[in-house]
Amino acid sequence: MNVTKLVETLGLDVVSGPFEREIAGVYVGDLLSNVMAKAERDNLWITIQGHQNVVAVASLTEVAAVIVVEDFELEEVAIERAQERQVNILRTPLTAYELVKKLINLGI
Amino acid sequence: MRELALHILDIAQNSIAAAASLVTISIDEQPGRDLLRIEVADNGRGIPPEELAQITDPFFTSRTTRDVGLGLPLFAQAAERAEGKFEVKSVPGRGTEVTATLRYSHIDRAPLGDLTGTLLGIIVPNPELDLIYTHYYKQKSFLLGTGEIKSTLGRIAISHPEVVSWLRDFIQAGLDDLYGGE
Ligand SMILES: Nc1ncnc2c1ncn2[C@@H]1O[C@H](COP(=O)(O)OP(=O)(O)O)[C@@H](O)[C@H]1O
Ligand SMILES: [Mg+2]
């Protein structure tokens, strides 16, 4: 599945993007150094963080999109940086657990 | 990073990359005043004033292999998360001082973690470097200066396995004593 289709299917807010990316796999985590080590290219990365460091980690790991759950706020500078770098940032009021259940049902 | 010790290692690696010959690490743990202060200072090449303003920007780095530099931004964020302050002072040609002051009891403050591993991780691969480590816990203190150890060792390298093993025990005993009985 690609990011645009996912946004439509789950009704996610688009904070930055959508930039065309195929999705393969999911990683959930908030500790950025750990995400750097574990997230893989084309993953969906689920986090509650809205810090601009998230954008840097997303760009470094080349994840397909970041999904910020529980409607956590994103810093303005994070949004600008994400748009500049073409990093997809999506948002939802769901918790990570609720979102992951939906992703599993979609076969991701 | 899951431990503050890993941030300290990373920040000291910036000092080494900046050609420092002396790195001073000071930790001050004052639970009574709800303060944890960590300072890493060096005598390396320093940071030009125009770059200093961007230092906690994750998209600033002088690396050429990638375009993000996360060492300082992640340490700054670890401090912010614990209602703390983060400051970098630098004088080009003189050196750099990175200070994080965290709220000791804050629920999101990372633990200090494996300080022995961090110190050995700095000392062993950089035998030329002088490291001064000061660690206060309440009124007690632990001090380690590799300059003095190296002059005692004479021609034996500080990275010699037997020396490293002694150092590990020495640091571990020093830290255990610092927290003695707690
Ligand atoms: N102690 C230091 N002395 C001189 N320059 C430094 C020091 N610490 C950081 N810098 C500069 O700041 C930049 C960003 O550092 P950092 O956030 O740790 O990311 P990285 O080390 O990955 O570049 C470095 O590339 C370097 O130019
Ligand atoms: Mg660094």
Image: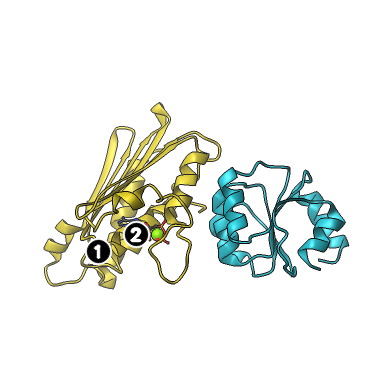
Picture coordinates of residue B139, whole percent (x, y)? 29, 32
Q: Nearer the viewer, residue B66 or B135?
A: B66
As drawn, is B85 to the left or to the right of B95?
A: right
Q: Is residue B111 visible?
A: no
Q: Secondary structure at mark 1?
A: loop
Colour of chain A in the image: cyan
- Colouring: by chain
Colour of chain B in the image: yellow
What residue is rendered at 85% in x and 66% in y? A107
Ligand 1 in which quarter: bottom left
For residue B19, above or below residue A31: below
Answer whether labels 1 and 2 touch (C-beta < 8 Å).
Answer: no
Q: Which mark is residue A54?
A: none
Q: Nearer the viewer, residue B134 or A18?
A: A18
What residue is rendered at 62% in x and 46% in y? A50
Picture coordinates of residue A93, whole percent (x, y)? 77, 43
Q: Which mark is residue B14?
A: 2
As drawn, is A108 to the left or to the right of B67?
A: right
> To which chain does the residue with label 2 belong?
B
Cα gap from disc 1 to disc 2, whole angstroms: 9 Å
Q: Quadrant of the C terminus of chain B?
A: top left
Judge the density around disc 2: few (<14), some (14-19), many (≥20) Cα neighbours within 10 Å: some
Report the amino acid beneath label 2.
Asn
Picture coordinates of residue B159, whole percent (x, y)? 26, 70
Q: Which mark is residue B19?
A: 1
The picture quadrant where one finds residue A17 is bottom right
**Residue at mark 2: C-beta within 8 A of ligand 1:** yes
Report the amino acid beneath label 1.
Ala
